[in-house]
Image: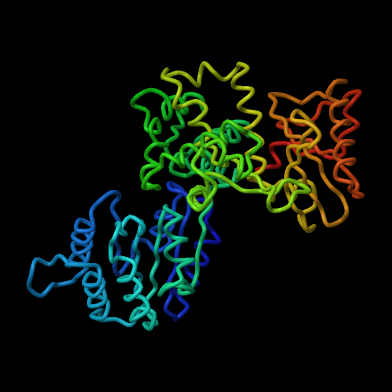
């Protein structure tokens, strides 16, 4: 299995702890949560069940009972379908208690959020099962997964009732890094150069489910066309499926995503509230939290701003690619014919920025500052709407600030006289407005480096795309 080494190590460690374990694994849909658990334990579960999206409580309990019978539960009389979730978990308790072994019993419940219907007794029944019995059984390891991270957070992590502080370990599963994407492509015999790997990340993020669909006989552009464009493309309606399965009523979530997509450099909470026109209260708080916990958006603090100046921005590459291209284009060969024009260049510049922001650790390593405490942010001049801005500010504890310019180009990037003047203006504006006394180092993050020339000496450090891998 590519990547996930630390997560596998932790799961094996918990499996041999000799204590009751309640493990919650959460993350964006399609990121590989189920695959991680099944590969780690080779499907050797005492009991496993997967929740069903958009099904009734009765249907869920019926399928849960079927899974119980498949694992050896023998109901006494009746239909065999529990009347409520308390009875369902009592049946699971009976099954576990009857196990003729003292070995570790792995219980895996996948997509648990889908099991909790409106006005359901699922949560209190699950609380009663764990707190009232399972948490006292040293041979039980319960693993729960869910893509609806907002449900996981609200009903388990931040629950003030019976599940408060009951989770023994939580694992937030992240998308692959660029290096893991390269390793994954190699493992599948897919040949890509560094630029292709980065551009595929700009489109699909590091989502293994999407990468698995790539075919080695096609170029990257051909794969994108076959996966994303045309009515039969498997990812043509992926965004709609994501929204429908993650959120009960996704209309307002979509409005927030569209507002952030239109404002690439981010929006404050107040600006979002004004644009989407459904208030600045608890409803917006919930929506922003749900989108953040699903990995679709991120919240960050611009350099020099307090908590109230924090900005939200669209962080999921595939969601951004869908909103930019997939939902508008109909041609089945759209991407192959679009890869060398102004629209592609405009998109690639912003998308490459997002790739870099997702790899701050790799940037720090390339700059030789991995051992230095840093804080990453951005900066926009307050003097005018069209004022100077810096793509990435790395504020270092060693009294240095890296002002990073991020440029996606198909060859070495050339700094001409006009851009040299613009860079000097940015540095001066940053120094004057922030009043910083730290040393300012101009850093260029580019695909193929900065071309040596008359104006290249302004650059004090460089990172090229190979170093991101």
Which quadrant of the figure has residue 138? bottom left
Q: Is residue 406 left or right of residue 341?
A: right
Q: In this view of the protein, which residue sits in the foreground, 75 or 395?
A: 395
Q: In the rendering, at what x and y percent does residue 62 appear? A: 18, 60
Classify the position of the C terminus by image quarter.
top right
Residue 316 x/y as whole percent: 54, 41
The one nearer the camera, 90 or 98, is 90
Residue 50 seen from this side = no
Q: Where 392 sits versus 119, above or below?
A: above
Q: Residue 464, relative to residue 84: is it above or below?
A: above
In the rendered image, residue 28, in percent from the top left (x then y), is placed at: 47, 49
The residue shown at (91%, 31%) is 457
- Does residue 285 appear to the left or right of 145 in the view shown? right
Q: Residue sitting at 56 percent across and 44 percent down?
A: 297
**Residue at the limit of the structure toward the left, as seen here:** 77
Residue 144 appears in view: yes
How did the renderer colour the structure? rainbow
Please count the marks in the image: 0
- Tell me what residue is drawn at x 36 percent, y 75 percent: 130
Q: Can you give x and y, in whole percent of width and height, for residue 185 in the image?
A: 52, 40
Q: Is residue 302 above or below residue 113?
A: above
């Amino acid at each position: 299995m590519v990547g996930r080494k630390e997560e596998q190590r932790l799961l094996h460690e918990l499996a041999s702890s000799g204590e009751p374990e309640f493990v919650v694994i959460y993350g964006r849909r399609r990121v590989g949560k189920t695959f991680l658990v099944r590969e780690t334990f080779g499907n050797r579960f005492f009991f496993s069940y997967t929740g069903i999206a958009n099904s009734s409580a009765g249907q869920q309990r019926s399928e849960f009972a079927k899974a119980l019978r498949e694992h050896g539960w023998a109901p006494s009389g009746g239909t065999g379908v529990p009347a409520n979730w308390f009875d369902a978990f009592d049946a699971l308790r009976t099954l576990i208690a009857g196990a003729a072994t003292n070995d570790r019993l792995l219980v895996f419940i996948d997509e648990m959020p889908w099991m909790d219907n409106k006005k359901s007794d699922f949560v209190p029944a699950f609380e009663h099962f764990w707190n009232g019995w399972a948490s006292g059984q040293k041979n039980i390891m319960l693993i729960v997964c869910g893509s609806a991270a907002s449900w996981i957070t609200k009903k388990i992590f931040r629950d003030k009732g019976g599940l408060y502080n009951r989770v023994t370990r939580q694992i937030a599963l992240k998308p692959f890094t660029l290096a893991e994407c390269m390793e994954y492509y190699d493992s599948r015999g897919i040949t890509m150069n560094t630029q292709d790997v980065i551009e595929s990340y700009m489109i699909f993020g590091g989502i293994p489910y999407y990468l698995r669909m790539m075919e080695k006989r096609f170029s990257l552009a051909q794969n994108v066309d076959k996966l994303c464009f045309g009515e039969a493309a498997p990812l043509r309606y992926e965004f709609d499926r994501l929204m429908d399965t993650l959120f009960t009523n996704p209309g307002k979530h979509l409005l927030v995503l569209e507002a952030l997509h239109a404002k690439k450099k981010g929006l404050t909470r107040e600006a979002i509230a004004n644009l989407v026109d459904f208030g600045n209260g608890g409803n917006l708080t919930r929506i922003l939290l749900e989108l953040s916990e699903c990995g679709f958006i991120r919240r960050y603090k611009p350099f020099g701003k307090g908590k109230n100046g924090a900005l939200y921005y669209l962080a999921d590459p595939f969601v951004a690619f869908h909103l930019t291209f997939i939902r508008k284009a109909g041609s089945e060969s759209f991407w192959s014919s679009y890869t060398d024009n102004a629209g592609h260049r405009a998109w690639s510049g912003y998308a490459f920025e997002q790739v870099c922001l997702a790899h701050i650790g790799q940037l720090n390593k390339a700059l030789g500052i991995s051992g230095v405490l840093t804080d990453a942010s951005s900066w926009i001049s307050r003097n005018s709407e069209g004022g100077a801005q810096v793509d990435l500010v790395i504020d270092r504890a060693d009294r240095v600030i890296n002002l990073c310019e991020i440029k996606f180009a198909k060859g070495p990037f050339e700094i001409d006289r006009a851009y040299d003047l613009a860079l000097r203006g940015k540095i001066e504006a940053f120094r004057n407005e922030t009043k910083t006394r730290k040393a300012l180092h101009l850093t260029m993050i580019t695909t193929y480096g900065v071309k040596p020339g008359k104006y290249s000496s302004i650059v004090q450090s460089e990172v090229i795309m190979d170093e991101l891998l």
